[in-house]
Image (cartoon, helix red, strand yellow):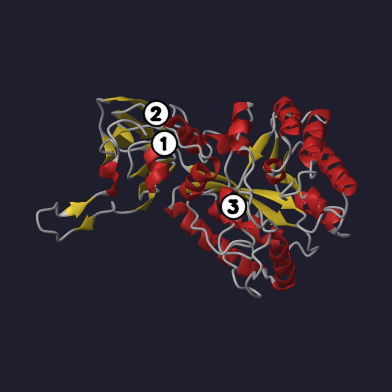
């Protein structure tokens, strides 16, 4: 007897016709045609059941603040930072909490049940930290929220950032962040990486740095980050986010850099939506794509986890909270269009970021938490193509969100009466 039984599911690894039995909030059985009963039975109808989506890079303190104090006219990263700097002194804990909780509602509706959010610690009031620590506690029953102490104005460039970052970690923030390319000089950027990795090692914490988010091929702080990772024994606990300068580096240097990152067991966190929007702003034509070298990183054995980064904030006037939008953009921007490519990019918004965050009990195996998403699609490639409805979102064996299947009624002579977008899947995997 199970609490919940999902019948006839397709899994991301290609298994089909699988039944999933849930007991006490965990997966208790996973096999075809389970001979069992349950308090609740869901017929997946051969559609995809995946582990929940995971966003490894977001800014929840800024989300849903678009237009405050005004719009980003140039569309650049630097104007976005300037706008945030104007808004930051006016922020209240209550307003940040309200916006963050509203975003988490949206995330849950999209099957996004784990988020790593960078939290700006440049304002010594640390109202952002207080707010998101409250949000982390309030959403814990349905969403895992991991927080990064992020000195947006520069760890060394901002005179109060170093002390504020230490205080944020003392308050319970989970991860050490940084932004070396925003320091005043390359040397200051290198020094910030060294200092922040030392802090992480001393405190036993993970590291996630905004690193080389620029079109400048000489912005090479990721090299220092890899070296400091090894120096401080942080292997497997460090991520470099964005890494966009890599798209402009010469191939010889990248051929040296990738093995260094692999040796350090670093993860890479590109953000396809925001990187495609912000980078290449100083180019005329040809205009650079702005996304880091995802296929080459994967080929070097470096874990790649894709982030949403921003939704309706000073940097990005779009976004839906849907990690399949992120994967969809990545397919196009990286030209990773094969079936295997799409499976790897689906993993980059599920399994890989779960490993980067160190989530316990994540996955679709016996013993894992019963956290799942039933999608109106048959496999990962179709899920990325369609970005379909989340028919059921399940947390610890309980349905916490559901959306009706997408169907369009037709009134066309001699044609079917309805269209189901999922019915257009090719007979073989794309």
Circle 3: is it few (<14), some (14-19), or many (20+) Cα within 10 Å? some
Residue nearest the observer in this picture, 259 or 134: 259
Say if residue 70 shows up in the picture. yes
Say if residue 359 shows up in the picture. no
| Left or right: where 167 falls relative to 147 | right
| Left or right: where 427 falls relative to 366 | left
Instruction: Check residue 28 in the rendering and tell me which mark sits there, or answer none.
Output: 2
Mark 1, secondary structure of its residue: loop
Q: Point out the residue furthest to the left here.
A: 414
Marks 1,2: beta carbons within 8 A: yes
Cα–Cα gap, marks 1 and 3: 43 Å
**Residue in the picture at 40% in, 41% down:** 397
Residue 107, percent from left and from top: 49, 54
Circle 1: is it few (<14), some (14-19), or many (20+) Cα within 10 Å? few
Marks 3,2: beta carbons within 8 A: no
Instruction: Check residue 24 in the rendering and tell me which mark sits there, or answer none.
Output: 1
Q: Viewer-nearest of labels 3 and 2?
A: 3
Residue 381, percent from left and from top: 40, 37
Cα–Cα gap, marks 1 and 2: 9 Å
């Amino acid at each position: 007897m199970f609490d919940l039984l999902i019948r006839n599911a397709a899994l991301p690894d290609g298994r089909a016709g699988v039944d999933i039995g849930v007991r006490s909030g965990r997966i208790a059985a996973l096999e075809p045609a389970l001979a069992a009963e349950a308090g609740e039975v869901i017929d997946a109808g051969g559609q995809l059941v995946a582990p929940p989506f995971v966003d490894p890079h977001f800014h929840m303190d800024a989300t849903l603040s678009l237009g405050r104090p005004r719009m980003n006219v140039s569309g650049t990263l630097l104007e976005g930072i300037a706008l945030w700097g104007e808004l930051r002194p006016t922020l209240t804990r209550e307003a940040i909490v309200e916006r963050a909780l509203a975003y988490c509602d949206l995330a849950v509706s999209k099957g996004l049940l784990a988020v790593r959010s960078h939290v700006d610690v440049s304002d010594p009031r640390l109202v952002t930290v207080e707010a998101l620590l409250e949000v982390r506690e309030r959403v814990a029953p349905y969403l895992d929220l991991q927080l990064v102490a992020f000195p947006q104005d520069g760890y060394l460039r901002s005179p109060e950032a170093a002390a504020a970052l230490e205080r944020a970690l003392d308050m319970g923030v989970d991860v050490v962040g940084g932004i070396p390319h925003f320091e005043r000089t390359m040397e200051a950027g290198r020094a910030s990486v060294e200092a922040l990795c030392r802090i992480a090692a001393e405190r036993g914490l993970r590291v996630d740095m905004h690193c080389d988010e620029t079109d400048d091929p000489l912005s090479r702080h990721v090299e220092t980050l890899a070296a400091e990772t090894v120096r401080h024994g942080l292997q497997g606990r460090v991520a470099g986010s964005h890494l966009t300068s890599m798209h402009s580096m010469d191939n010889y240097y990248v051929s040296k850099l990738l093995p260094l990152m692999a040796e350090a067991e670093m993860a890479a966190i590109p953000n396809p939506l925001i990187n495609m929007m912000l980078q290449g702003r100083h180019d005329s034509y040809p205009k650079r794509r702005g996304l880091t070298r995802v296929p080459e990183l994967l080929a070097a054995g470096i874990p790649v986890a894709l982030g949403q980064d921003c939704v309706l904030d000073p940097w990005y006037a779009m976004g839906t909270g849907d990690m399949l939008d992120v994967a969809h953009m990545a397919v196009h921007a990286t030209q990773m269009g094969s079936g295997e490519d799409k499976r790897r990019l689906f993993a980059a918004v599920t399994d890989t970021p779960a490993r980067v965050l160190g989530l316990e009990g994540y996955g679709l195996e016996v013993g894992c938490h019963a956290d799942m998403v039933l999608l109106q699609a048959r496999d990962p490639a179709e899920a990325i193509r369609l970005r379909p409805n989340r028919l059921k979102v399940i947390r610890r064996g309980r349905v916490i969100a559901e959306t009706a299947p997408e169907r369009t009624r037709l009134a066309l002579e001699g044609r079917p009466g309805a269209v189901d977008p999922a019915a257009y899947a090719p007979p073989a995997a794309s």
